[in-house]
Every structure is written in C-alpha cells, then in structure tokens.
Amino acid sequence: MYELITQLSRWVVPGLIAIVLVTAWVRRVNVFEVFVAGAEQGFSTAIRTIPYLVAMLVAIHIFRASGAMQLMAQALAPWLAWIGLPPELLPHAIMRPLSGGAALGIATDIIARYGPDSFLGLLVSTMQGTSDTTFYVLTLYFGSVGIVRYRYSIYTGLAADLITLLASIAVVRMAFHAGL
C-alpha cells in the first residue's frame, strides 16, 4: 500500500499540470498569457500587503524586545498550570497567534532542549501543527482585500487558538499517555 501511494504521489503533480495544459489547449486558452496576468495580480497583491506585514512585524518585535511577553507569561503562569500547560510552553502559546516563524523558533528550541518524544516536545509539536497565526492571517488576507473592520474575526480566531491549546493538551495526554 505504501509503495502504491509513493508511486501515485510521484505522478499527481505532473498529471495535474498535464490536465491543465490539455484543457487549455482544448478550450484554446493561451496558458502563458493567463499565467502572466495572474502573476501581475499576485505582485500587486503582495505590494498592497507589505505595509500591513511591516506594521505587524514591528509590533511583534516591540512586544518581544520590551519584555512584555515575559511579563505576560509570568502573569498567566498560575492559571495555565491549572489547565496543565507547562510554563516552558507559554511563550509558544503567546507567540503562535502572532507569528508562525517566531513560534516555530520557540518550538524548535523546546524540542532541542527537551527532546521530541518528551511531553513538552509532543505538546509543542501538536500546538504548532494544529493552531494558526491568527493575527498574521488577519493582517495578510484581510489587508490584501481591503477589509478593515474585523473585530469579530479577532475574537473568533483567539477563541480557536485557546480551544486548540486545550485540545492539544488533552490529545497529547490521552494519545501518548504523557504528562500524567
């Protein structure tokens, strides 16, 4: 079965490209011109979102460099211990909605320090894989289409992040019998 899936996965992408080219040829669509037009739209979207990304990255850097993240981690530590979240994971839980790259750096550090099969390694891997970068998504995607009023989206995204955090703790404890 594994060999079949491996062979199939090798031909999926070339097959899809061939289907697109054949379909375009049958419909008499100039693929190159359509591709260039799409690339132009993508470039203008990228240019339009750069100010939003720069503002978000500067805010994240100020948040980390000012020590506000550490203060927040210390303030939340007693409550998060109550739900079973080790204090070592709090920076990751705080940073994940803000920046995927920064959260990945924290996760990499935790895995290198405690090991991938430890409770912390399993939990941070689960959190990294199941949560999303709420503020990054709002900044980039909403900014690219010009949405400026997104207050309920922030609440919904942060609620989803909290639920993901709680579910990650529960799943890692149940699935791996870790941290009990």
Image (cartoon, rainbow, N blue to C red):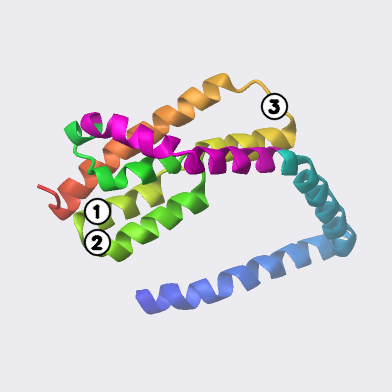
> Callout 1: 10 Å neighbours few (<14), some, many (20+)?
many
Q: x and y percent of residue 88 in the render?
A: 27, 48
- The answer to whether mark 2 and mark 1 are in CB contact below 8 A is yes
- The residue singled out by tag 3 in the image is 147
Q: What's the magenta bit mostly, secondary-structure-wise? A: helix
Q: CA distance from mark 1 to mark 3?
A: 38 Å
**Mark 1 element type:** helix
Residue drawn at x 68%, y 43% as measured from the top left: 54
**Residue 117 quadrant:** bottom left
> Callout 3: 10 Å neighbours few (<14), some, many (20+)?
few
Of the pair 24 and 26, the residue shown nearer to us: 24
Q: x and y percent of residue 86 in the render?
A: 22, 44
Q: Any mark on residue 120, and which?
A: 1
Q: Nearer the viewer, mark 1 or mark 3?
A: 1
**Mark 3 element type:** loop
- Which segment did they paint magenta? 52-79
- Tell me if 138 is positioned left or right of 40 in this view: left
Q: Amino acid at mark 3?
A: Ile
Of the pair 90 and 170, the residue shown nearer to us: 90
Q: Which residue is at the far left?
A: 180
Q: x and y percent of residue 172 in the render?
A: 22, 49
